[in-house]
Amino acid sequence: MNKRTMMKTKTIKRMTLLISLLLLSMMAFSLVAFGTNGDFPLVMDDSYLLTDEEYEALVDHLQAISDKHDFDVVVVTTASTGGRSAEEFAADWFEAYEFGRGKNDGCILLLATDDRDFGFAALGYGNTAFTNYGQDYFGNFYLPYLKQDRYFEAFMSYGDGVDEFLRMAKAGTPYDKGNIPGEEEPEPTSKRGIFGAISVAISALIAKITTGSWKSQLKGVRSERGARKYVRQGSLNLTEQKDVFLYRNLNSIVIPKKTESTQGHSFTTSKGSKATGHKGKY
Amino acid sequence: MGIQEFKCPNCGGAIKFDSAEQKLVCPYCDTVMDVDALKALDDSLSKEIKSEAVDWGYEQEEWLGDDGQAMALYSCKSCGGEIIGDETLGATSCPFCGNPVLMPSKFSGSLKPDLVLPFKTSKDQALKALKDYYLGKKLLPAVFKDKNRLEEIKGVYVPFWLFDAEAHASIEYQGKAEKSWADSAKQHTETSHYRIIREGTLTFDKVPVDGSEAVDDDLMESLEPFDFSEAVDFQTAYLAGYFANKYDVSFEESQVRADERMKVSAEEEFARTVDSYDDIDVTRSFIDIKNGKVSYALLPVWLLSTKWQDQTYTFAMNGQTGKFVGDLPLDKSLSRKYFFGIFGGAAAVLLVISQLIATFM
């Protein structure tokens, strides 16, 4: 089944869902991949950012990771979040379509293309695997691709990131402060040494400035530069005063963009579930 | 050339100028005389002295002291003691009887000062000012504060040249005016360049330059300003009880310094008229000092000197305003102690704080 056919099928399914989930569940589909509820695919590309081939490859990739960890890994693209916070909108989407395995285990990456917003939410075991601090590092997996509109690479890499984060969490060492690749926590000893050296330097400066000001008190003889005290008041008489414009030049400097932070935070979904996530612009 | 003493018309004692009373006072019978009232007496005495010039003039042949300076010999009219002074000496006190002695010839004819600014502060005030000057100076050697070290204190009328002049300036500047704004991607800075021309005049009144070789120029400039609105026409009587020298630096030599100071201030004043720019550079400056008028004045200065570790320290107090200046010695070992004390104290506190921060970070 190609992508276009599948989208049509999805629309029908959503309409049918409103009438009767029961009827929908009885329909036989041979779609490539669905969430654990078996009703909706792990990739919902409403904004048509992926080609058919990319779509199928991504679904396969995410399905494999989801099955490996028993953890739904979902990607959604839509036009807008309707003014809601992207990560909360993503979490509600996750629950509305009944994703999640076991204790609601899973995560979702949602793109709202109108305003180039993205939101990530993780529920269930995702609260353990995706620490607030670790999510800043997690953003490195997909954000650079999103900024270049390389959506397929972004989503594939997102899947790899989820795989990696779940692996680390299961090993008892989730990515968190002090356990982020390339972000070595300074040894307490060296930190103390640096702080100590700075303290000594500041102390020397304080001593130098203080004794320097006391030394200057001993010097009272100074020659006068000018004779301002002897200018007759109001005697300045300007006989010529010209300001001639010569030329103008313009210098423009590109404002460096702030480094995007995707550090996460915890929140509660509309259905009351505990979730963690982050949002941003791409 | 003779010497002059102002005698009390009541008891015949030598009278002195009193800075507090601003009058001549006899220290023996407390007679008080107005300076103006004494002017007639001053004139008559001068005439009388001229007639006695043969008896009291300094030696006709010029002789030189060790430093090659022309010296002169005077005789005190009160006790007959011989006073040796340099050729510029105009007023002093007799080292034998303490009477104030004046040499009117040093301040007569073409050498007569145009103005004198009378002393308004006393010797006691100068001594108190010196004590006060030591206060709060942490690095001053404690032994230096001992007033017994004071070697000499004297009220001196220092000869000054006062220059009135107009500075004619023609100055060009390069000015920059910047305007900055930003959009979503870039920060823009637009710089407009201007050629700025200012021409005009600025008038200076009585810029003082000391006319004595013996007195340090920087020390005298440190005493400024003097308020010349209180200056009066010169009368010899004002010098009674003080030291005074005639000038030995000509006004032509002194004018160089006056011009220098006036040019600096003229540039500063004209630069203030160029205030609507973010940055200005002077590209051309021509300042001519014109319409100059010079006057010769005696200005009141208390000079104090102390000796410490074979070095003489000279202080000065403006005899009119009481402003006190001078360089003091540095106690190097105390300076080192303070440095290491402050360093140690600050380091102890900062190290504790920084280590606590490092631990909990």
Image: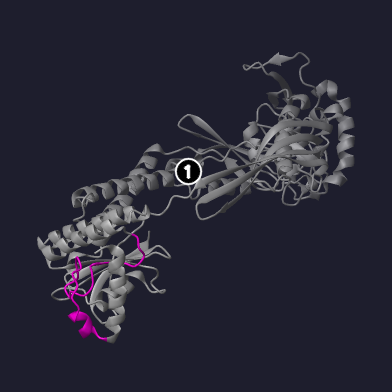
Query: In which quadrant of the rendered image does the N terminus of chain A lie?
Result: bottom left
Tell me which chain the residue with mark 1 is part of: B
| Location of residue B74 with respect to B16 vertically, above or below | above
Q: Residue drawn 27% across and 56% down?
A: A54
Of all residues shown, which one is farthest toward the left? Answer: A171
Q: Residues within 10 Å of mark 1 (few under 14, many from 20)?
A: few
Q: Pick the residue in front: B86 or A13.
A: A13
Residue B56 x %, y %: 80, 24
* Residue B7 included in the magenta stretch of the image: no
| Location of residue A112 with respect to B305 vertically, above or below | below
Q: Pick the residue in front: A99 or B115.
A: A99
Check disc 1 and report its element: helix, strand or loop. loop
| Location of residue B142 with respect to A178 vertically, above or below | above
Q: Pick the residue in front: A147 or A262.
A: A147
Q: Determine the image quadrant of residue A124.
A: bottom left
Chain part drawn in magenta: A20-49
Residue B317 x %, y %: 63, 43
Q: Determine the image quadrant of residue A248.
A: top right
Residue B77 x %, y %: 76, 30
Does A264 sit left or right of B64 as displayed?
Answer: left
| Location of residue B232 with respect to A143 vertically, above or below | above
Q: Residue drawn 59% across and 42% down?
A: B325
Query: In which quadrant of the rendered image does the C terminus of chain A lie?
Result: bottom left
| Majority secondary structure in the magenta region | loop
Q: Pick the residue in front: B314 or B168.
A: B168
* Residue A41 included in the magenta stretch of the image: yes
Visible in this render: residue B158?
A: no
Tell me the residue that label 1 is attached to. B146
The amino acid sitting under disc 1 is Asp
